[in-house]
Image (cartoon, helix red, strand yellow):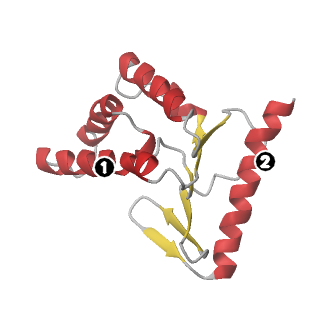
Amino acid sequence: MIRAHTVLPGPLRSSSSDVGAFCALFERRLPPATEEQVAREVTARLNRQRLLTERPNTAFSFIIEQAVLERNMGGSEVTRAVIDHLLEVGHRLNVEIQLMPLRREEHSGVDGHMYLAETSDHQWVGYTEGQRSSSLIVAPKDVSVLLQRRLHRTHLTCSRRRR
């Protein structure tokens, strides 16, 4: 499973970062969310974290914007906990975490969030999100475009390390 993000993906969140940052996010959401809605969303996101440990033979790859870590969502303590958690999760053999630097002359992630997953039948599917919409992408030609963008993102994040 491969994911590319401009926000911290659910499986990479620690309990303290989800409660602190996610609740702060929902407090500003319009229309306002109820406490029950916030609790339900936080629980669902925390449950997705289990994928990393329950599927040790599944490779997970994440590209995270540097701005996500510099935003300080939830305060300094939450941000420190997020960074510590990313370092811990990044040591898992089935997890790869890449950071997209703030200053880049080109960026293939400007079209928004993108998720890619390979099924047990070795078919790739994509999923993209927007403000009030999302799309499941299954047509091979369209999924190929997403895979190319993902490879380009990896190239951009890795090329910085070589300099």
Q: Residue at x 75, y 37 (%)?
A: 104
Mark 1 surroundings: few (<14), some (14-19) or many (≥20) residues within 10 A: few
Q: Nearer the viewer, mark 1 or mark 2?
A: 1
Q: Is residue 156 above or below residue 102?
A: below
Which image quadrant for residue 57? bottom right
Tell me the residue at 69%/80% (across/down). Answer: 141
Q: Nearer the viewer, residue 36 or 33?
A: 36
Per the image, the residue denoted by label 2 is 155
Q: Quadrant of residue 161?
A: top right
Compared across the picture, whether 29 is left or right of 93 comes to left
Residue 50 in the image: state x and y as whole percent: 37, 48
Q: Is residue 158 visible?
A: yes
Foreground residue among 158 and 68: 158
According to the picture, the residue beneath numbered tag 1 turns out to be 47
**Amino acid residing under circle 2:** His
Among numbered discs 1 and 2, the one appearing first in the sequence: 1
Q: Is residue 30 above or below residue 82?
A: below
Q: Position of residue 148 (x, y in %)?
A: 74, 63
Q: Secondary structure at mark 2?
A: helix
| Residue located at (34% from left, 33% from top) | 21
Left or right of residue 125, residue 34 in this image: left
Three-letter amino acid code at disc 1?
Answer: Asn
Q: Is 155 above or below relative to 129? A: above
Report x, y in % for residue 60: 56, 51
Q: Which mark is residue 19?
A: none
Viewport quadrant of the C terminus: top right
Instruction: State the residue lying farthest toward the front.
Output: 57
Helix, strand or loop at mark 1: helix
Circle 2 Cα neighbour tier, 10 Å, few/some/many (<14 / 14–19 / ≥20): few
